[in-house]
Amino acid sequence: MGWYNKRLSKSIWVFHVSASPCNNCDIEILDLLTPKYDVERFGIKLVGSVRHADVLLVSGVANNKVAPKVKYLYDQAPKPCFVVGVGTCPASGCCFKKSYNVPGKVEDTIPINLYIPGCPPKPEAMIEGVVKLVEVLNG
Amino acid sequence: MSKNIIPVGPFHPLLEEAEYFTLKVDGEKVTGIDLDIGWMHRGHEFISETKTFTQSIYLVERICGICSTSHPLACVHAIEDIDNIDIPLRARYIRTLIGELERIHSHLLWIGLAGHFIGYDTLWMWAWKYREPVLQMFEIISGNRNHYGMMRVGGVAKDVDPSSIPKLYNILDDIAVKMDMIANAANDDPVLRSRLVGVGVLSYEEAVRFCAVGPTSRASGITADVRKDDPGDAYDLVEFNTIVMKNGDVYDKLVVRVLETLESIKIVRQCLDKLKNINGPILNDVKEISPGEGIGRYEAPRGEVFHYIRSDGTNRPVRHKVRAPSYVNIPTFEASCIGIPIADALITLAAVDPCYCCTERSIKVVDSARQPTKIDLLKISREKTDYLRRQINGN
């Protein structure tokens, strides 16, 4: 699928999945679209439907209620689809890993290709993460 | 009369959080609304009971990323209430400074999102552009854009560097100019007026009936502000006005938030003036928390946030209860959304600035075979109060 991935890297369309986060990463993701960071100049666009998405941005720990829906969303996304875990929560569970309502790692629900750690990660870090993804896609 | 149902969510392009609305519609009119929550529940109250007091302050910061200083402030107020701990004057001003900066960034965020919801993306981009300097101020003071980690029992964790104060003044002056511009724009803009005036009206009586708090209640004519009614920190030492409007529609909620931002800028300026002159410690050393219970209140950007903490003399809370402002503001949809067209429903839902991360606390279901009713919940709640009362009296 190398040729396909290379096409994908020109203009990445992302879909934002909030899997029980604290809103902070979500706000920073929206911040990326606003004039100071403006990732749309790189062709990165936030889309409304998961069926248009190339990359899923997952934030949060995915609690018992939301985890089946996140899996459902991932199944609906056209493949190849890459998943980026934004923030510490998908990476390690942050301070919620001992909670009764958190079934485990987000990794057990859907495969994650790239992690951007930080609580919340700075928009610059998110841009760097996406640039790394583009480098991988280009081979 | 045929009734149709429009489901919105849990993952909807306009909703940044996962939540699930069911709008019952008859033609164009909304006749009923139902809300399914629990998508964000992470069990903060349970985790907090396994952490020490200092750790639980950093934990409640993660309840919500937007009001990420309101929850720690209410939490430290609750812990300080147990032992009547005093905090140094400089720390009081720093707490107020952080709290008011947060109000500016939260209200600007809402103004932007409201523009986005009515399809007015120019307003979104402009409001968020002018929100960036506020985050820059946070970065100068605390080192992080969000989740500042400033609050501690008995004071604050970090001091404001005196050499950074001129820089903070400069940034604040910029923000003040831009905020005046946004205030004028909100006043003049024909698009905003035609979309928001008279939409989603929450009358004074309904606001009282649903016990609405914060800007939602102040837009309906209720003069309620924890900063004035129960001033903690430095709020009794600074001058500001409580903004009250009377129509209760979405436009008034917008105006309340815009004018409150201007008031917050005034408070921040007063705090910076004082921080230049007041020197001294920023943290009182608190050795241990004695057994007892305490409550803490703070006026978050969305309304009154309430924390209850019970201590048994060890280093961790036995019970930690959180009540967020959205918990009482969300039911006002019942009053404001019924009878309006679908096109106006979303902005009305967004007008109370609902934060579902804050709202979703746990309910203990004893008999899982059937759904608990209101009477069951009341019974469980009263039994628990009795149980706690017996325990406290027993001690």
Image (cartoon, rainbow, N blue to C red):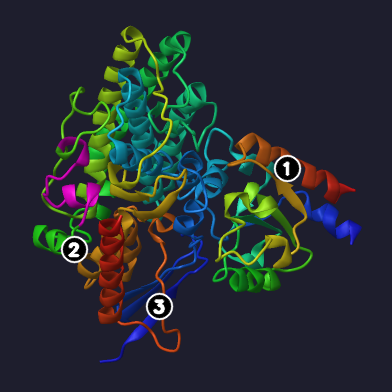
* The magenta stretch spans residue B216: yes
Relative height, residue B148 to residue B367 (above, below): above
Q: Residue furthest front?
A: B394
Q: What span is colored magenta in the figure? A: B212-228
Q: Measure the C-alpha gap from mark 2 to mark 1.
A: 45 Å
Kindly identify which residue carries mark 1.
A129
Give the structural element (helix, strand or loop) at label 2. Answer: loop
Does residue B118 appear in this view?
no
Q: Measure the C-alpha gap from mark 3 to mark 1.
A: 37 Å
Residue in the image at 27% along x and 55% along y: B195
Q: Which mark is residue A112?
A: none
Find residue B299 and report its image quarter.
top left
Q: Measure the C-alpha gap from mark 3 to mark 2.
A: 25 Å
Which mark lies nearer to you, 3 or 2?
2
Residue in the image at 45% along x and 38% along y: B128
Which mark lies nearer to you, 2 or 1?
2
Three-letter amino acid code at the position of disc 2: Phe
* The magenta stretch spans residue B179: no
Q: Which mark is residue B210?
A: 2
Residue in the image at 12% along x and 59% along y: B208
Q: Is residue B60 left or right of residue A73?
A: left
Q: Is residue B149 left or right of residue B277?
A: right
Q: Are marks 2 and 1 in contact (CB under 8 Å)?
A: no
Q: Are marks 3 and 2 in contact (CB under 8 Å)?
A: no
As rendered, which of A105 and B302 lies closer to the eye?
A: A105
Three-letter amino acid code at the position of disc 1: Gly
Q: Quarter of the image containing the N terminus of chain B?
A: bottom left
Kindly identify which residue carries mark 3.
B6
